[in-house]
Amino acid sequence: MLGQRRLIPSTSMLMAFEASARNGSFTGAAQELSLTQGAISRQVSALEEQLGVKLFERVKKSIKLTEVGETYADEIAVALRTIRNASLNAVSDTQGQTLNLAILPTFGMRWLMPRFPDFIEKNPQITVNFTSKLSPFDFSNENLHSAIHFGHPDWPNTDGTFLMNEEAVPVAAPSLIGDHMIKDATEIARMPLLHLETRPNAWADWFKQNDITPPANRGMVLEQFSMVTQAAVAGLGVALLPHFLINTELERGELEILLETPLKNSAGYYLITPKTHTSYAPVNALRDWLLEQTRDKETTE
């Protein structure tokens, strides 16, 4: 029993150590936790004594993590984050009806948000918290129940539910093409092209699909669909964009489809859920609703 207790230090010790490791000083940790520097130092020393290992090298007034300390700091940071998220969920929603969902920015803005009032109306008991990210979602370090992801359902320890394909077509502003009628892909190869950072090979794949060697001039690269769309509307080049994300611009006449030859893509939009949350009621409600929204073929265009 004594051995088990030794391996489970108090949260005050762990918080003092983790804050010190992250800030690189006892002073920074003290300011963050609203304690004195002496209190932080004593907590860390007590932790080292309880574990029987040296976590910091102390040189004059500075501290540096030992090799053991570096590994321990990484693991404790994850453990404290898990405890913090669990406590937040317990405090904010005693019924377990909070849904933390990660979404892609433009997909969320253009496709999901206009439809989402229907989900809220059908599921008023669920509080949804959104986070938008371009970088990969990290279920191990972030308090997420699920994520809408573009790609393939090959994430470890998760279940992937297919939602829709993404068939992008070449579009441009009327100001760029004028009265000229684009007849084939070779003409587009001679025009300025707009590239999406997260789809770096999209244009090359589209040209190869049309039996054309991709142009050597790479052209402008932008970070998000919304930026590519606005650049295309401004007449800066031809963009390869999915129908369902540019319906508004097409209806307004701000963009025109140059050729109805979409890029065939094996990737798609998926609802990715950690296996630990696949039976969570809010996730199931969201999954059923998304499948209902994407069941109609028109939503994939």
Image (cartoon, rainbow, N blue to C red):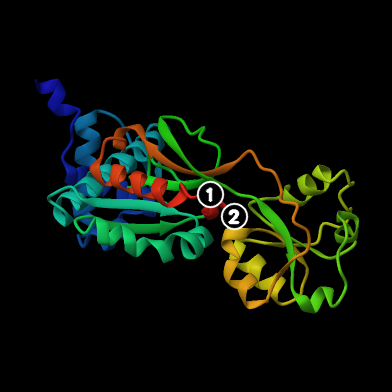
The quadrant where residue 238 appears: bottom right
Q: Position of residue 103 (x, y in %)?
A: 45, 54
The quadrant where residue 252 appears: bottom right
Q: Residues within 10 Å of mark 2 (few under 14, many from 20)?
A: some
- Residue at 63% of width from left, 52% of height from top? 198
Disc 2 + disc 1, Cβ < 8 Å: yes
Drawn side of residue 119 relative to residue 218, left or right: left
Drawn side of residue 3 relative to residue 75, left or right: left
Q: Is 233 drawn above or below residue 285 in the view shown?
A: below
Q: Position of residue 99 (x, y in %)?
A: 28, 51
Drawn side of residue 298 relative to residue 159, left or right: right
Q: What is the quadrant of the N terminus in the image?
A: top left
Q: Give the Cα distance between marks 2 and 1.
A: 7 Å
Q: Is 20 drawn above or below residue 2 in the view shown?
A: below
The furthest residue to the left: 1
Q: Is 276 drawn above or below residue 289 in the view shown?
A: above
Q: Which residue is mark 2?
A: 301
Secondary structure of the residue carrying tag 1 is helix
| Viewer-side residue, 210 vs 155 | 210
Q: Which residue is mark 1?
A: 297
> The residue under label 1 is which amino acid type?
Lys
- Residue at 75% of width from left, 52% of height from top? 261
- Residue at 32% of width from left, 50% of height from top? 20
- Residue at 46% of width from left, 46% of height from top? 295
Residue 163's disc is none
Question: Which mark is in front, 2 or 1?
Answer: 1
